[in-house]
Image: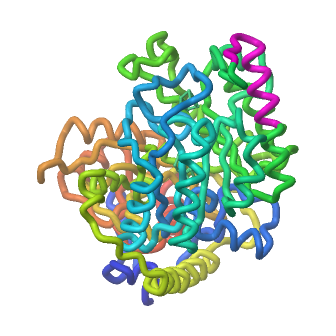
Amino acid sequence: MTPPPAASLSAPPITDISVTKNTVTQKKSGGCGCSSNQSDAKPAIDDRLRERIEKHPCYSEEAHHHYARMHVAVAPACNIQCNYCNRKYDCANESRPGVVSELLTPEEAAHKVLVIAGKIPQMTVLGIAGPGDPLANPEKTFRTFELIADKAPDIKLCLSTNGLMLPDHVDKIKALNVDHVTITINMVDPEIGTKIYPWVHYRRRRYKGLEAARILHERQMEGLQALREADILCKVNSVMIPGINDDHLVEVDQVIRQNGAFLHNIMPLISAPEHGTYFGLNGQRGPTPKELKKLQDECADSNMKMMRHCRQCRADAVGLLGEDRSQEFTKEKFLEMPVEYSLEERQKVHAKIAVAREELQKEKVKAKQAEVIPSPKILVAVATKGGGLVNQHFGHAKEFMIYEVDASEAKFVGHRKIDHYCQGGYGEDASLDGIIKTIADCKAILVSKVGECPKSELKQAGLEVVEAYDVIENVARQFYDQHFASSTI
Ligand code: CLF
Ligand code: SF4
């Protein structure tokens, strides 16, 4: 069969699948997979809602295989203190700790967006997420949005905030046509908040302890409700902090859902002494991937959509989620680049992507079973560079997408970062050990290609290696069926 157009953007034809551990080789047939375009999407998505999220790589799991986002770091100040944050770095509510972005003026930011909109036409969303809190810097944030809305009307505007000043700005956000707002909500019980927030600065006064946490909580709830009333899509980010709010986040999930949040993104605390944060210096650990998945699964049992593909990106992130092209567009470089924004050219690219997505979707639907078949679940690790395909060489992968597979479907459940194996053209034994540990709970690794040496070590470690070039869900489901046919899981 011919590959879906998604593949045709840059891909060779779909080839055979070979499962090396069991030496099973089988020609690709009609295909099987999953039709879900939203992780754990429970409520029906109507056409208008679909249109609002279909090109947003954070709000739609399916979109993140095809569309990119970028951030501009125009907002340096913050009005609260989180125990997982060090002011030297980007806001840890959306970023990995330890990352520093170059500050831009709104005019520089607008130039950067227009440059990148020409160079990366798949970039559909501009987010402001730091390095401090965007709404602690409302003039810079809103000026940036104004400049971009004026010159690049097809780019969606997105904002991430701690929520303290959100109720004051919802009207302005609405007026600027910012359709996506994220609030980081780590607690709905101010007692728990005292363990996360030492102080907040509100209306020219600094509050500490319970009072600080209470103010933050009330303002976050007020902001969330105001977004719902204004019909602005709201995502809630929560940082999972073991021993502090891990059990509590199920309640947070329920409360935010009742108050109109569209999507919940539970992210792991990343904590290390070298980040210089309160938690890092005091030995507070982050959750393991297993703990994170368990909590996400528990929350997904409710009626809430759960985001599992967040990459905790930097305040100057550029590219598909999971790829970081920020270094190609440092201030020194982008200020020298001419603006090549063309609405017409961008629309042509988006039309091609839409056709590719449709074909991809057909492939997935073909194989997804209409009914749930009770069967054991396994995890597989996938190397992909986008397009919804297994299409990356093992040695080039910097992360694996994790899919949970059973006899009915293959479902995206998360991703794991790794040190990529090929560095300077040579495979690294140390990184291979790290990779094996990172995906030790997976049954198989799905890659476009892998060298003989790592392949044999992966097999020795108990991982089956599947080499294929095809729709992820198809490869994963075929592997599952072959594995069951030839062995007991
Ligand atoms: Fe940026 Fe955030 Fe908008 Fe996305 S990121 S402001 S909603 S455009 Fe996305 Fe990055 Fe996760 Fe944020 S992957 S950290 S959720
Ligand atoms: Fe840091 Fe962001 Fe928290 Fe402010 S809101 S303290 S910048 S993590």
Which residue is located at x 55 percent, y 68 percent? 155
Frontmost residue, 295 versus 433: 295
Q: Nearer the viewer, residue 312 or 202?
A: 202
Q: How many marks?
A: 0
Magenta stretch: helix, strand or loop mostly: helix
Q: Position of residue 36 (x, y in %)?
A: 66, 66
Q: Which is more toward the observer, 444 or 59?
A: 59
Q: Furthest residue to the left?
A: 425
Residue 210 is inside the magenta segment: yes
The reply to whether residue 25 is in sight is no
- Stretch of the chain drawn in magenta: 205-221
Write down the quadrant of residue 447 in the picture: bottom left
Taking depth in this image into account, of 367 and 151 the one nearest to the observer is 151
Which residue is found at the position 66% from the left and 22% from the top?
201
Q: Quadrant of ligand 2?
A: top right
Residue 471 appears in view: yes
* Residue 458 x/y as whole percent: 30, 47
Q: In which quarter of the image is residue 120?
A: bottom left
Q: Quadrant of the N terminus?
A: bottom left
Q: In this view, does 419 lie to the left or right of 312?
A: left
Q: Residue at x 59, y 78 (%)?
A: 361
Q: Is residue 218 left or right of residue 79?
A: right
Spot occupied by residue 296 in the image (x, y as percentages of width and height): 66, 41
Q: Which colour scheme is used?
A: rainbow
Magenta stretch containing residue 204, yes or no? no
User: Percent from the top left, x then y, of residue 177?
Assistant: 69, 63
**Is 201 displayed left or right of 451 in the figure?**
right
Left or right? Give the position of 84 relative to 115: right
**Rendered residue at 56%/19% (across/down):** 83
Q: Is residue 1 above or below residue 60?
A: below
